[in-house]
Image (cartoon, rainbow, N blue to C red):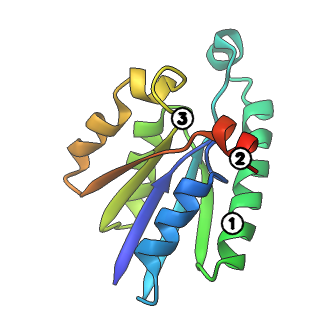
Amino acid sequence: MRRLLVCANETLGGRALLEELSRRVGDDEAEVLVVCPALNHSRFKHWTGDDGEARRAASERLVASLATLAALGIDARGEIGDADPIQAMDDALRTWPASEIVVSTHPPGRSLWLEQRVTEAAARFRLPVTHIVVDLEAELTTA
């Protein structure tokens, strides 16, 4: 059985990610775990542990994403993860044995995760890693 660990934040509802997940799951039996890191855009809030706002925003994105996946016929569950996407994936993999990882980011130039080389760092988990680029701005202009 295919077990996909999906790590995404703002790009969770992006068309490219949803299409890729639909393609990968298809008619096969698959389990999907979506991990949405609670990104704190303020270093002060991060250092002081004030992540309530970041967790609420991540939770809203996660709930909407899971509803969209369910509407597409994809059975998925989700969790809010650590602000560090690599740590969030590591935490998830400790209790959920994935067979592959899907990481979704903004395009180059707008993605902090790409600057931090998250997709390359995910190779440490010794699982196939697929990187999906979601351009939310382009999706809005074509919608």
Secondary structure of residue under mark 1: helix
In the picture shown, does residue 38 fall above or below 61?
A: above
- Left/right of residue 143 with respect to residue 89 in the rendered view: right
Name the residue that disc number 1 marks: 66
**Residue at the image position 30 percent from the left and 68 percent from the top:** 99
Which of the 4 image quarters holds residue 55? top right
Amino acid type, callout 1: Leu
Between 14 and 102, the one lying in front of the other is 14
In the picture shown, does residue 50 fall above or below 105?
A: above
**Residue at the image position 46 percent from the left and 83 percent from the top:** 26
CA distance for labels 2 and 3: 17 Å
Amino acid type, callout 3: His
CA distance for labels 1 and 2: 23 Å
Name the residue that disc number 3 marks: 106
Name the residue that disc number 2 marks: 142
Secondary structure of residue under mark 2: helix
